[in-house]
Image: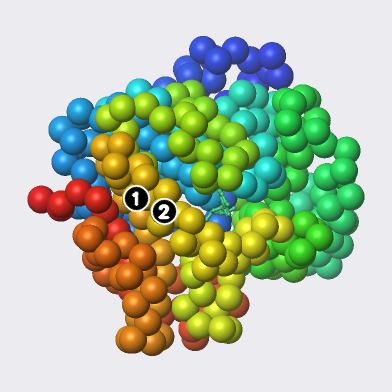
Amino acid sequence: MNSPLENINPKISATEVRDLFNVYKVGARPFLKWAGGKSQLLDKFQELYPHELKERKIGTYYEPFLGSGAVFFDIAQNYDIKSAYLYDINEELILTYTVIQRDVSKLLEFLYNYQKYYLKFDKDRRKDFYYAQRTKYNLQRFNIDYSHYSEKWIPRAAQLIFLNKTCFNGLYRVNSKGEFNTPHGDYDNPTICDEENLLAVSQVLQIAEIKVADFKQVVSDLKEEAFIYFDPPYRPISKTANFKAYSKYDFSDNEQIQLAALFRELDSKGLKLMLSNSDPKNINPDDDFFDKLYVGYNILRVPAKRMINSDSNKRGSINEIVITNYSIV
Ligand SMILES: C[S@@+](CC[C@H](N)C(=O)[O-])C[C@H]1O[C@@H](n2cnc3c(N)ncnc32)[C@H](O)[C@@H]1O
């Protein structure tokens, strides 16, 4: 099939995007690699969703720690969700989702150019180009108004996707000043412009309200008969596995405790809740931090492969802890 990109006009309408999407008919999946991404756990998670979702009695979905959105894409395409509320504290991530939702065709043009030039370069030029883009990305963040959508958001989203596809391990990591600092990745043939998937993602996002928010704000948008999935930054399973650099904001045990309090508050309102985290018992069988925090709820342990670890020898199978406020049938 010829690339429909050749036909893409910057003023393409939402209907035309939908038509292109219908040509491809692919399912939407995460468009970024993200630490803690849940794609490889979806088969297991599908068994753990509330039966009201499977019986199509729940029409509203919330995901307050969106990341790459693996669970959202699964739920939005396989169940009868009419609206979704997607939040993350990372403003670059939310900017990128918003651009895909509103202006995917213009975004594709930027990505297509990145792909065309980057893939033509030899190894050394690719590396130089990557670091030049990374510097630009870090400097330009001061020129972006993250609270008001503008044309400037489109090349910004393209930069983030380019960096994610070409950086080491696809790892989004920032330092305490908020500067993206992942080194170059040296992939032979990265797909920078995945037009089929981005069109599908844009289509699926049409039901969503997407915003930069702290997880506690979920309370203000609540509807009845909703399902909420919480996937907070992992509580480190060891002192050396302390990955929590999605944003300049910290997520310590104090935030995990506040989240558990929110879980109890939402439970009392009758919402269906599911939460996952790393299982501290992987390292210390006596560590019952989550067992204590979520006492009275269903606590399951599910085998998972942890993908983000700079040492490939340490990417083994470990348990993920999953907590629900409903029984699994
Ligand atoms: C484990 S990741 C979510 C991964 C996601 N489920 C996926 O499949 O890719 C945790 C996310 O929480 C976000 N985050 C961190 N602190 C937050 C906060 N206080 N409120 C909302 N989001 C937060 C991070 O930016 C990150 O994207």
Q: Position of residue 140 (x, y in %)?
A: 87, 44
Disc 1, disc 2: CB below 8 Å? yes
Asked if residue 144 lies left or right of residue 308, the reply is right
How many marks the image carries: the answer is: 2
Crowd tier of the residue under label 2, counting other residues whose Cα lies within 10 Å: few below 14, some 14–19, many 20 or above: some
Q: Amino acid at mark 1?
A: Arg
Q: Position of residue 159 (x, y in %)?
A: 75, 45
> Any atom of ligand 1 within 8 Å of the CB at mark 1?
no
Q: Residue at x 68, y 43 (%)?
A: 91
Q: Is residue 149 left or right of residue 13?
A: right
Residue at (27, 69) in percent of width and height: 301
Looking at the rendered structure, which numbered label has been put on residue 261? 2
Residue 264 circle label: 1
Image x and y of residue 218, in percent: 48, 38
Image coloring type: rainbow
Q: Is residue 121 above or below residue 55?
A: below
| Label 1: few (<14), some (14–19) or many (≥20) C-alpha neighbours in 10 Å | some
Residue placed most toward the observer, 154 or 62: 62
Query: How far across and how far down the image is residue 311, in percent?
Result: 57, 82
Disc 1 is placed on an element classified as helix
> Which of 123 and 87 lies nearest the eye of the viewer?
87
Q: Amino acid at mark 2?
A: Ala
Q: Determine which quarter of the picture holds residue 27.
A: top left
Q: CA gap, disc 1 to disc 2?
A: 5 Å
